Amino acid sequence: MPRLERSQWYDLCRDMNWSFKYVTEAEVFPEALSHSHGIPPADWWTWDEPYKITYREYVQNQTRKEADVYSVRSALARAKFFENLDPGWKAAIVAHYGAIAMPEYLATLGEARMGRFGRAAAWRNMALFGTLDEIRHAQIQFSFSHALLNKEPRLDWAHKAFHTNQWGAIALRHLFDDMLTANDAVSMAIQLTFVIETGFTNLQFLGLAADAMETGDVEFSTLISSIQTDEARHAQQGEPTLRLLLEHGNKAEAQRLIDVMFWRGWRVFALLTGAAMDYYTPLPHRRSSFKEFMLEWIIKQFNDQLRDVGLERPWYWELFLQELDWLHHALHLGTWFERRTVWWNPDAGVSFAEREWLEAKYPGWHDRFGTFWQTIAENVRNGDVAHTHQETLFVVCNLCQIPMCSPTIGVPPQLVTYNGRVYTFCSDPCRWIFEQNPARYAGHLSIVDGFLAGDIQPPNVAGVLAYMGLPPSEQGTDAMNCAWAYEQPQAAAASAA
Amino acid sequence: MATVPLQAAFRGDFVTLLVLVDDEDTMDVVAQKVAHHVINRRLPPESLCMRVRYNQQVLSPDQTVAQAGILPMSFVEVFYDAGVRSHAGMDRGS
């Protein structure tokens, strides 16, 4: 039997598409799960992607990647690397595992949905590899985090977070249910792989791996790099799906799907990555500010992506650019103030040198945020710990579920009445997303709604912490034990010199 | 007497807070209850009277929540009135 080149047999073997005789197309591909957008089956069959990997090659590649990552972990286990990491960086990775490991599992469900309900065999084939990728990403991050449990018990939140009512977990669950577990195959290909993976996480993981290496966290760097190489491949499902939609006159719907998920992704990105880059990463190891990273990498590439397929920037682009200057600073301040309600130890990141860096990167930072930290530092020095905590809930947005921060307090939140219930939104885009499909979101109760419904008992701070699944041993504290608050200006200047 | 949850912000702060007030609370009391969560935590106290703004109107200090018709989860903004010094010294809010 002659041995054929891969290019001679790959498409033929992969593209097992056929017309159904004994069942209808709608029975095989229910619209709720598949969403054909009226594109005929034979047109879907033109779907193609550039990687064209075989199963044998996939298994060989993945086996090699796994061996590389686990060998690094074995080597480092003897080196007490975790104990020697900067407390701020520990905050970043403990937060990361709780926020990301479980969504990788949800992404498995999403990829499997595309692997079953994608309208072309080529797509389903790629999604199968994506499913296996995401199983690996979930399992490897559970494995790595749990291997460190004896050093940081809260790494258990890698698994626990999504099973709690912790406010950040609610926000993440709301996002990932919208994008993954409650989404159809076509929308997911665009929203997960084109917007989130290609637009955000693929580049974020490159930056995160580099930051981890710079900080000395070789294990985390190797892990993230290994995951990123998978994402770069399976993220290719978005563009061919998008092009088919555009070729068949669905530009408005394609643009809407992108606009919805870019905004949702941005809000969570600002919450997690913004703090990690501009506050948790040790100052000597910061290669760029969060805003610089966004402008140079995320925004540039996203603009190129949109231009290449003939789509526009989201309609809220100017608002998004404005938020680059302040949103993550506000969310970081809020997270630090509510530090008892998170499973990691937030690093305030406001030593004198860090404040100078922040002012240089974000002119006006001191006037807008530095003065808050001065008041906080004064309370710390006076031993007034009570005033460094919040005694009530922040109001959260009924769409993104993230605290309602504003650069201009005094502007009322946006209130929408739907079926007799009043919903609160932090911004025009969050309100717009809700109004696109209110029935999809209306039944959800935010942490504030739960409090008002009597779900949190007793209705006080202790009740809130218990509701969020945070016993005292798991509540966050300042990563540096507030040492930054005792820093004297003269000492800081001498140290800098 | 009924509890009225409000979405409240103190001018100069960065976030909207859930603040529980009573429908018989005057605006002076509402201002104090909101300030409790902000002043001396993130903003310094000032020797000025505090005011409550609701529906683009600054309300009278002795008007109650019920009299003002403030509904649950309405938004109110509290601010220091630059033109009126506080006789009670600095409004520390807590």
Image (cartoon, helix red, strand yellow):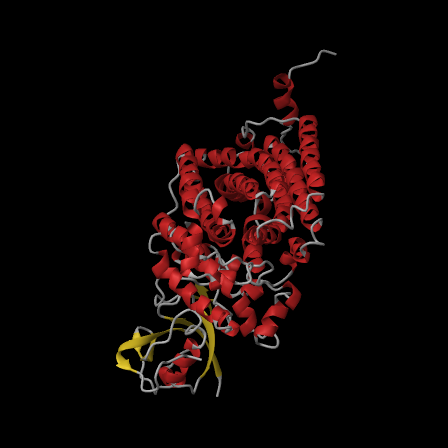
In the image, residue B71 sits, relative to residue A85, either above or below, namely below
Q: Residue A394 in the image: state x and y as whole percent.
A: 48, 67
Q: Residue at x 70, y 36 (%)?
A: A71
| Total numbered circles | 0
**Residue placed most toward the observer, B77 or A116:** B77
In the image, residue A132 sits, relative to residue A16, either above or below, namely below
**Residue placed most toward the observer, A384 or A100:** A384
Q: From where the camera sits, is residue A336 visible? A: yes
Q: From where the camera sits, is residue A455 visible? A: no
Q: Residue A188 in the image: state x and y as whole percent.
A: 55, 44
Give left or right: position of A194 versus B10.
right
**Residue placed most toward the observer, A400 or A478:** A478
In the image, residue A484 sits, relative to residue A297, either above or below, namely below
Q: In terms of image quadrants, where is residue A205?
A: top right
Q: In terms of image quadrants, where is residue A4?
A: top right
Q: Residue at x 39, y 79 (%)?
A: B31
Q: Residue at x 57, y 65 (%)?
A: A341
In the image, residue A194 sits, relative to residue A315, either above or below, namely above
**Residue placed most toward the observer, A441 or A51:** A51
Give left or right: position of A239 versus A222.
left
